[in-house]
Image: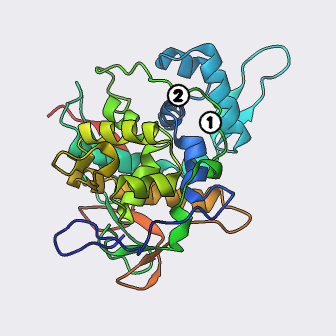
Amino acid sequence: MSTASTGTPSPVVSAPPQPATETANTIGRALMLLGDQWTLLILQRAFLGAERFQDWYDGLNISNASLSARLAQLVEAGVLLRTPARAGGGRSVYRLSESGLGTWTVFVAIWRWEQDWISAPRPTPTELVHDDCGARGIAPQLRCTACHKPASLRNVTARPLAELAVIERSFVPRRHRQQRTALEAGDRLTFHAETMEILGDRWNIPLLAVSMLGLRRFSEFERALGLPPSVLSQRLRRLTELEVFAADSGERTDHRREYRLTRKGRAFFDVLMLLSDWGNQYIPSADGNSLILDHVPCGLPLHPELACSGCDRTLSRASIHFALSFT
């Protein structure tokens, strides 16, 4: 995940990663849970206070069956804790577990990316407030917990490199049929539809991940991810339309083109790193198949954290809140 002096990521592998594992790697395991639009929205609303089935049903345009299935999966994964209804009345309560609460950094990083790269405004914008210093409208910065220096695509490397090979057999089969959620443009609480399209597809994040390792060519993506050519073409074409990738010019066919991350695509680095870190912490692999990242400035394994852009102190879940901005 190093970059050349031009500011564009340069390859850190001499050949495309080899599909070497039978079990899901860090990113794969995290995506099994979070790589679904409804799941992301359910967790987001849990942070905002939803805890009963009706809270999500009323707040989201989701079917009874879809909501039941997602809640059951999140309980099974230990992301939500379910308190059964008492005999004789009442309804079950779902609350975020320690691992569920641990996703707060991912959601903050998604919000920050939207602030920087989605031009469509919300009817009522939100701003992030750091309660410890009182700063409003902060822009959280990703940094290394060991040295407190910034962590970016320019100064992070991955090892072993083969572990970003996220081929089909690396994933537990998707439990839910991929659907597009009916996001309301006027809903200030939800994510932008474009963000959901990037995050809510099981292959988009792996595509971004191997691109950040330096892969460019269609054949390299195909080899590393094990995707059928038609599916890969569709994903690359759509991500290019969203200006996450830029395809080289010329008369080449899809199979011969090179695709490079744009600034918008590279900015998704923070989300990817925090997603991977959450997977390492809360759904580790018994065989050690985790994505290990090294922070070049200090030479230590990267454990990312978010820092306040105002006072430079480390942010915690309890020290920040979102406030509606009417200015």
Please state the horizontal and vertical placement of residue 86, each as a whole percent of the image. Answer: 81, 22
Quadrant where the C terminus lies?
Answer: top left
Q: Give the residue number, with chain letter if any, for mark 1.
A: 174
- Seen at 75% across and 32% down, the residue is 83
Q: Which residue is located at x 55 percent, y 17 percent?
A: 57
Could you tell me which residue is drawn at 49 percent across and 56 percent down?
223
Along the line of sight, the residue nearer the viewer: 236 or 119: 236
| Depth check, front residue: 303 or 311 | 303
Residue 326 in percent (x, y) is at 18, 31
Whether residue 209 is visible: no
Residue picked out by circle 2: 178
Q: Position of residue 207 (x, y in %)?
A: 42, 51
Around disc 2, counting alpha carbons within 10 Å, would you say few (fewer than 14), some (14 to 19), or many (20 or more)?
A: few
Please tell me whether residue 298 is drawn above or below residue 6 in the rendered image: below
**Along the horizontal axis of the image, is 247 left or right of 23?**
left
**Can residue 243 be seen?**
yes
Q: Assign a secondary structure to mark 2.
A: loop
Quadrant in the rendering for residue 71: top right
Q: Quadrant of residue 240?
A: top left
Label 1 secondary element: loop
Residue 297: x percent and y percent? Answer: 34, 83
Pick whichever, 147 or 176, lies toward us: 176
Label 1: few (<14), some or many (≥20) within 10 Å?
few
Total count of labels: 2
Confirm or deny contact between disc 1 and disc 2 (CB under 8 A).
Answer: yes
Amino acid beneath label 1: Arg
User: Looking at the picture, does residue 274 appear above or below residue 112?
Assistant: below
Q: Is residue 115 left or right of residue 225?
A: left
